Image (spheres, rainbow, N blue to C red):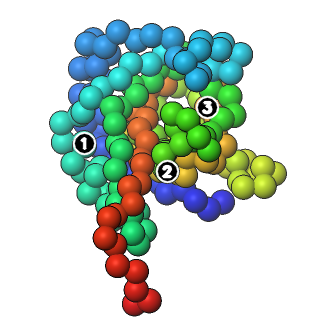
Amino acid sequence: MEKYWEIKNFLSEQECLDILTKYKSELKLMPAKVAGMEITDKRKSSVAFIDNIENVDERLKEYLKNLIQIKGFEVTGLGPYQFTEYKVGEYYDWHTDSSKDGEYKDRFCSIVIQLNDEYEGGYLQLKDESGDYTIQLDKGIGRMYIFYSNIRHRVMPVTSGTRYSLVNWISLRKLENFEKTLI
């Protein structure tokens, strides 16, 4: 499988615990929506949005700047983090995070940071470009996955415990006055 990156221990266990402790008590989680509508046969989870997370934003931006280097473009985007909770039986069926036009057309890469691993099931899975092969990504506290937003992916149903993650999306902006060279 190509087109994804795994970064083990992007956040420490303590950072994940601090995020969970702070935001589980501060946020009001709402049923997640798909294209603005609550569609329970496609997605069942709860979400809230966090504008920025101290010490995570800058580290993530620096990491992305070094990871994604495309001539003539710079990494932008990285809006509010989606704090996502999946309880027993909750899931998100196959989908992509980008579209050819509309609200999500500028999404280039998706980011998923796992905040805990005290749950069963709930695996993040990706499809290859042909759609014939599925890869199941490993769980791990503080583990981050980055993948192209047009890759089909899903979160399998949680069978015990509660799964928490942070999700964000990266956009690219074309650089003005970028001089194309062969070197």
Residue 19 place in picture, x, y as percent: 27, 28
Element class at badge 3: strand
Q: Residue at x 43, y 31 (%)?
A: 165
Tell me the residue that label 2 is attached to.
Answer: 108
Label 2 – label 3 distance at C-alpha? 20 Å
Q: Residue at x 58, y 59 (%)?
A: 3
Label 3 – label 1 distance at C-alpha? 23 Å
Mark before the other along the chain sequence, 1 or 2 = 1
Tell me which amino acid carries mark 3. Val
Tell us which disc is closer to us: 1 or 2.
Answer: 2
User: Of 47 and 13, which appears nearest the observer?
Assistant: 47
Residue 58 place in picture, x, y as percent: 21, 48
Tell me the residue that label 3 is attached to.
Answer: 155
Tell me the residue that label 1 is attached to.
Answer: 56
The C terminus - image quarter: bottom left
User: Is 124 on the left-hand or right-hand side of 55?
Assistant: right
Q: Which residue lies furthest to the front in this view?
A: 177
Tell me which amino acid carries mark 1. Val
Residue 171 place in picture, x, y as percent: 42, 49
Q: In which quarter of the image is residue 120?
A: top right
- The reply to whether dot 1 and dot 2 touch (C-beta < 8 Å) is no
Element class at badge 1: helix
Element class at badge 2: strand
Q: Which residue is drawn at 40% across and 33% down?
A: 166
Residue 57 place in picture, x, y as percent: 25, 43
Q: Is residue 88 visible?
A: no
Tell me which amino acid carries mark 2. Phe
Vertical position of residue 114 compared to residue 45: above or below: below
